[in-house]
Image: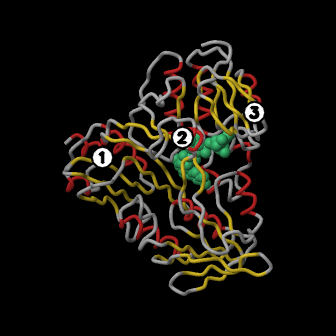
């Protein structure tokens, strides 16, 4: 590499990991990280959990203290948006007119919230949750007795509901599908979470399509459904998914197909450009197909893979995806992908208890697990999924047989 070194677009989870790993892999050249947010890289999971609840401060959310980047020889350009990549000249152009040259470029632009396109979408009090700034806006409504309508019963919506409820807020969750978290978990898990939230006093309404927001004085006061219902509110949080930030790459002629297309080492269709994290789409050997994942684990591992490749030590990324969600005292841990499963095996009692696991088998082979307050099941399943282990469903469901014995049968 020559004097320009590595430039990273985005200053989030994958970008921070790439800096750390470039240095631990022995890369000594210049690194520039360009991010459009004012903060140095931080973790997003606490934004809908302990940070939203006010239980931890930003010092526990940032990935590394700001001084780390200077000591690691990484120039941080914050509050700076990259507007274009000029591949023939190997330059990135920033929104404020700067040209920054690169030898190797890493695109780690993450994703943005999917916005709801209904009348009243721009009323004050309608919020999304992606950044620290969003948390502060939402927290400004946290007054006991205030009414919150959450649009979308996915993880983020349900985590927000749990935190808001703990803060004395009246919460209604509106979900279009016939159950919460329908995109990722089995009906058994959805039914469990609906029971828990209802027991906490959250109103969960499924099969409801939000048709618009109405307000007074420019401020939201009601959410209106396509079914003709009206839900009074003081504020709204919309959590209906994300869109990967791939436009820069696409405009530069890099291959994009449901994410920036990369190989297992993070290489894009341009040999000098890499991509990592939410914005990328990578091949996964365990499932034999391409995946675009939205998780911390994926951002970290891709950040590591890209750094290794850039320093000439290929360490292909090929792992079982995993994710978690915290709601009340419940830790949901998900490993693998349950798509196409043929049998769901339950271990524990989701109807009455607060701890169980659902194993997803495809023709007898374990492909995924949803574990609620069941760390041992989650850990063991993660290993077994990678090995394409064939398991006996009867033994798997039998809690008198421990997981090690089930695995060794
Ligand atoms: C509220 C919330 C809760 C979550 N909870 C969990 C969880 O419990 N478990 C889990 O595994 N995952 C969770 N996630 C997902 C996880 O945080 C993401 O998958 C992860 O942050 C992805 O990292 P990334 O580096 O790809 O993107 P990000 O961390 O989003 O970083 C990308 C950065 O690039 C910036 N950027 C974009 N375009 C440009 C540009 N043109 N110029 C400059 N900068 C740009 C963005 O503003 C952003 O700062 C959660 C996400 C949210 C929002």
- 21 or 311: nearer the viewer: 311
Q: Is residue 302 above or below residue 205?
A: above
Which residue extends farthest front? 88
Which residue extends farthest top? 2
Residue 273 as seen in the image, left or right of residue 389? right
Residue 120 as seen in the image, left or right of residue 365? right
**CA–CA distance between discs 3 and 1?**
48 Å
Residue under numbered circle 3: 77
Residue under numbered circle 1: 403
Badge 3 or badge 1: first in the primary sequence: 3
Residue 405, x across and y down, in percent: 25, 43
Nearer the observer: mark 1 or 2; the answer is 2
**CA–CA distance between discs 2 and 3?**
23 Å
Quadrant where the N terminus is found in the figure: top right
- 167 or 69: nearer the viewer: 69
Nearer the observer: mark 2 or 3; the answer is 2
Residue at horizontal 60 percent and vertical 16 percent from the top? 27
């Amino acid at each position: 590499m020559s004097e320009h070194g590595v430039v990273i677009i985005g200053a989030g989870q994958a970008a921070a990991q790439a800096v750390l790993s470039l240095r631990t892999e022995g890369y000594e050249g210049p690194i520039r990280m360009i991010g459009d947010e004012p903060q140095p890289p931080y973790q997003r999971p606490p934004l809908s959990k302990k940070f939203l609840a006010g239980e931890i401060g930003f010092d526990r959310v940032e990935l590394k203290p700001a001084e780390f980047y200077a000591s690691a020889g990484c120039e941080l350009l914050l509050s700076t948006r990259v507007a274009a990549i000029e591949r023939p000249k190997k330059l990135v152009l920033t929104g404020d007119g700067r040209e920054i040259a690169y030898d190797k470029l890493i695109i780690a632009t993450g994703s943005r919230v999917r916005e709801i396109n209904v009348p009243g979408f721009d009323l004050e009090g309608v919020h999304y949750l992606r950044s620290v700034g969003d948390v502060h806006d939402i927290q400004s409504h946290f007054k006991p007795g205030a009414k919150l309508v959450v649009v979308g019963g996915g993880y983020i919506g349900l985590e927000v509901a749990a935190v808001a409820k703990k803060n004395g807020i009246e919460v209604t969750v509106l979900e279009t599908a016939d159950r919460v978290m329908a995109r990722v978990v089995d009906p058994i898990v959805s039914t469990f979470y609906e029971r828990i939230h209802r027991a906490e006093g959250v109103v969960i309404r499924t099969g409801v399509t939000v048709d618009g927001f109405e307000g007074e004085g420019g401020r939201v006061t009601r959410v209106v459904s396509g079914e003709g219902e009206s839900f009074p509110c003081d504020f709204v949080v919309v959590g209906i998914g994300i869109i990967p930030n791939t436009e820069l790459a696409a405009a530069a002629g890099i291959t994009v197909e449901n994410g920036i297309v990369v190989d297992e080492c993070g290489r894009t269709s341009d040999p000098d450009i890499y991509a990592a994290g939410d914005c990328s789409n990578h091949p996964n050997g365990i499932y034999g197909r391409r995946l675009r994942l939205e998780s911390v684990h994926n951002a970290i591992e891709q950040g590591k893979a890209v750094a290794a490749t850039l320093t000439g030590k290929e360490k292909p990324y090929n792992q079982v995806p995993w994710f978690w969600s915290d709601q009340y005292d419940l830790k949901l841990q998900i490993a693998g992908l349950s798509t196409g499963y043929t049998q769901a095996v339950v271990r524990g009692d989701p109807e009455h208890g607060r701890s169980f696991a659902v194993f997803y088998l495809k023709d007898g082979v374990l492909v995924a697990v949803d574990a609620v307050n069941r760390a041992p099941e989650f850990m063991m399943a993660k290993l077994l999924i990678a090995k394409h282990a064939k398991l006996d469903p009867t033994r798997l469901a039998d809690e008198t047989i421990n997981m090690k014995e089930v695995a060794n049968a």
